[in-house]
């Protein structure tokens, strides 16, 4: 199969350079979240099949917001973010109203991230409105989860003052705040599933909670283009016998517009040619990634 036409056009538009570097980077997220494993798997596939002496390196980061800044500056070559946040950054909207990122270019979609409200078993959560007046982990500054939560709070005319206590831990630290007595009651996290971090949380008296249908309808208005109603399938995790009602948003891989064209061409072709193997490494990529990378 050929790379889809939009990617071919992208390659033609980017400036031509001979191979000018011996490595390139994909900035992602924390190791126990989803971005870093996805970036690592892409690098693993590239390094396995590339015939050039160029290495792909996955880099940890604070998340989507940081990735957009770092790739825009040229500090790293590629990055991962939710599509809705990418669009805000590229067009100077929302948090990026006075700080548009003009040097970033989309490549292809990766996976869906699910709004995930995980709480201790003794905390009753019947919908998103039940998270208020509780001790909540809202995610670290710079993460896509945090940016999305801000948008969701606006839909309810709420802000951080409506929580009893807040924690700003990353996905890597959810076990610390949820599995220790006296810390958070729950965490609001946007992440791909299945996720190794959540698999560990299943062993410490936690549960993933469904979101009310009317609340989902409200959230879908934030970005009808990128948000979808969906479920986390039953038995994705230990002690989760039923499907979880929620919504999800798509993520994208992007690059700096000045990134070496030949390296980018090589990378895109290898992802296209070996998409089945990549999906085996990262099942969360199917089917969004496979439909977008193929034509």
Image (spheres, rainbow, N blue to C red):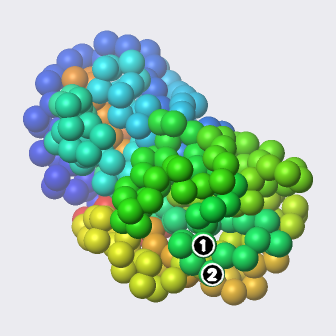
* Side of 185 relative to 127 (left or right): right
Which residue is nearer to you in this view: 166 or 244? 166
Q: Is there a contact, CB below 8 Å, between mark 1 and mark 2?
A: yes
x, y percent for residue 177: 77, 48
Relative to 96, 245 lies left or right: right
Asked whether 57 or 226 is in front, the reply is: 226
* Residue 126, numbered circle: 2
**Residue drawn where x is 38% and y is 62% of the image:** 157
Which of the numbered marks, if any, corresponds to residue 104? none
Please state the horizontal and vertical placement of residue 206, each as a whole percent of the image. 80, 67
Dot 2 alpha-carbon crowd within 10 angstroms: few under 14, some 14 to 19, many 20 or more = few
Report x, y in % for residue 96: 26, 37
The image shows residue 8, relative to residue 245, as above or below, that is above
* Residue at the image position 43 percent from the left and 77 percent from the top: 216
The residue under the point 26% across, 53% down is: 3
- The residue nearer to you, when weighing 6 against 187, is 187
The image quadrant of residue 116 is: bottom right
The part of the image, by quadrant, that contains residue 258 is top left
Dot 2: what SS? loop
Provide residue 47's location: percent of width, then percent of height: 52, 33
Please give the residue where the numbered disc 1 appears in the rendered image. 130
Foreground disc of the pair 1, 2: 1
């Amino acid at each position: 199969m050929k790379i889809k036409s939009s990617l071919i056009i992208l390659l033609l538009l980017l400036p031509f350079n001979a191979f000018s570097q011996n490595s390139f980077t994909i900035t992602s997220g924390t190791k126990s979240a989803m971005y870093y494993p996805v970036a690592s798997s892409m690098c693993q596939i590239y390094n396995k099949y590339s015939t050039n002496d160029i290495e792909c390196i996955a880099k940890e980061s604070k998340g989507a917001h940081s990735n957009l800044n770092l790739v825009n500056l040229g500090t790293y070559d590629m990055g991962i973010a939710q599509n809705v946040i990418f669009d805000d950054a590229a067009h100077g909207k929302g948090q990026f109203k006075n700080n548009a990122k003009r040097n970033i270019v989309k490549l292809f979609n990766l996976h869906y991230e699910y709004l995930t409200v995980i709480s201790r078993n003794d905390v009753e959560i019947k919908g998103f409105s039940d998270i208020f007046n509780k001790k909540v982990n809202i995610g670290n500054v710079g993460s896509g989860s945090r940016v999305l939560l801000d948008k969701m709070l606006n839909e309810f005319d709420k802000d951080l003052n409506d929580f009893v206590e807040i924690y700003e831990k990353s996905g890597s630290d959810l076990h610390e705040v949820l599995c220790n007595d006296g810390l958070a009651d729950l965490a609001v996290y946007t992440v791909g599933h299945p996720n190794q971090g959540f698999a560990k949380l299943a062993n410490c008296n936690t549960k993933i909670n469904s979101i009310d249908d009317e609340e989902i309808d409200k959230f879908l208005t934030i970005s009808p283009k990128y948000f979808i109603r969906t479920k986390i399938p039953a038995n994705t995790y230990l002690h989760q016998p039923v499907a979880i009602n929620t919504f999800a948003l798509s993520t994208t891989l992007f690059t700096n517009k000045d990134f070496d064209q030949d390296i980018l061409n090589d990378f895109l072709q290898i992802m296209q040619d070996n998409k089945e193997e990549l999906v085996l490494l990262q099942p969360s990529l199917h089917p969004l990634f496979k439909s977008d990378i193929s034509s």
